[in-house]
Amino acid sequence: MMKSARKWAVAFSMAATFVTSGAPSAAWAARTDIVLGVRLEPPHLDPTAGAAAAIDEITYANIFEGLTRIDEQGAVKPALAKSWTISADGLTYDFKLHEGVKFHDGTDFDAEDVVFSLDRARGADSVNAQKALFEPIKSVIAKDKYTVEMTLKRPTGAMLFNLGWGDAAMVAPESADSNKTNPVGTGPFKLDKWIKGDSITLIRNDAYWGQPAKLKKATFKIVADAAASLAALMAGDVDAFPIFPAPEMLPQFENDPRFKVVIGTTEGETILATNNGVKPFDDVRVRKALAYAIDRQSLIDGAMFGYGTLIGSHFAPHNPAYLDLSHVYDYNPEKAKALLKEAGLENGFKARLFLPPTDYARRSGLIIASDLKKVGIELELINVEWAQWLSKVFKGKDYDLTIISHTEPMDIGIYARDDYYFNYKSKEFKAIIAKLNATTDEAERTELLHQAQKKLNDDAVNGFLFQLAKTGVWNAKIKGLWANAPIQANDLTAVEWMD
């Protein structure tokens, strides 16, 4: 029996070899579907109407596109605008649009849609989370069907970069109001189905105007539990985690040839966000005491298992304009106690620390609470879901402290907003940002960015903890996923399986 079975297996193998040498068989064809694990489910799918990073992580460059886009290296590239010219005074931008572009519902994309999208984003009724990006725009007009003229109130050096954010995605008047649940963009993928609490599936847009995607289907599987993430990868139920949520488990994948572990960088400044508008945090001495009281390297080692980079301001270390201020407030609990005494708080105080549902926040919260208790600050740890965090902390500003990674690119300008949830108000900082926004010379911009970083550090606006690492784990046969995250995105346009 065993001999005959072996003879049959050899014969079958030879026959299979003969058949496949003559013509490719579907059994050996590269896969055209992928399942990606994500930690958080987005509240909706309209990137122009929400602050949650989870929205862009699914829709950016996949469903929605802007006039420009940000690539994996953080550079500005053409997208729906194939080219542009800028006037000598930096106030007028003429964009030439690609022709023949259609939205997923079959309607045409043209200059009128650009006017609608940008006017909507900056309008009085705008719900855009990054409305301030569009404030410098004075007017947007359609010069013809495929040419748009944008006029600014003042020169804005980062305008092309700003137009590459997910918040600047192009939408159509026919479908804009329903994009939260039925997103209609111009991208290479369109929504197939959303099973709430489980998964979001995209399918290839075969009418796409540009280079077609190699994948026919991409499913974003929501896996909230770290242990379940490990099990899903090991079982093959999930093919990739662009950001694996449990860094302590990475060594298991590093030693398994089936997987590739890719450690990259992100724009995620992880901060102990502080409400500068409430007592006692309106006192810079108290904020500096917080900074000295936290052992940030131990925080990285304990909460992030060594993955992360110390920071001293709200700026990514990989950026050429980075100013290293990471050791200004090195761990010094005695100095923290002295500052609290100087502020009249030698007996300490109590505060609320709101923790959103991410592992980095909740693990960090426990460690920070322990550190602050040593200098007399007792924290009440309050776990909240994203909807609560957005309504109570981000919008309502009803908080003392919270831990969050700000993953928006080059977003140091948020500290110049009076209505932002930090409640930080500094005329000096605003002046720096105003000058930066009006400057296009790179050397001058770098110097101004240094000044901005130093001002935030001097004022200890927030507890600047660490830069979040991008801990990617995926099947070794997958290529095209981003190693770095200069913008909050899982760009699938170049993703494919190797044979």
Image (tube, rainbow, N blue to C red):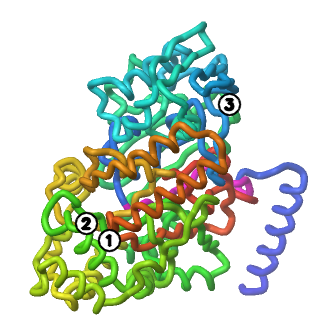
Select label 1 or label 3 by which is in front: 1
Q: Please give the residue where the numbered disc 1 appears in the rendered image.
A: 361
Select label 2 or label 1 by which is in front: 2
Q: Please give the residue where the numbered disc 2 appears in the rendered image.
A: 402
Residue at 37% over, 35% down? 131
Considering only order in the chain, which callout, 1 or 2, is on the residue closer to the N terminus? Answer: 1
Q: Please give the residue where the numbered disc 3 appears in the rendered image.
A: 210
The residue type indicated by label 3 comes to: Gly
Q: Quadrant of residue 463?
A: bottom left
Q: Secondary structure at mark 3?
A: loop
Choose between 469 and 214: the one closer to the eye: 469
Considering only order in the chain, which callout, 3 or 1, is on the residue closer to the N terminus? Answer: 3
The residue type indicated by label 2 comes to: Thr
Measure how far apart labels 1 and 3 are at the Cα level.
39 Å
In the image, 479: left or right of 129? right
User: Magenta span has 147?
Assistant: no
Q: Secondary structure at mark 2?
A: strand
Mark 2: few/some/many CA within 10 Å (<14, 14-19, 20+):
many
- Residue 483 placed where, x, y %? 62, 62
- Residue 236 placed where, x, y %? 53, 68
The magenta stretch spans which residues? 27-39
Q: Is residue 46 visible?
A: no
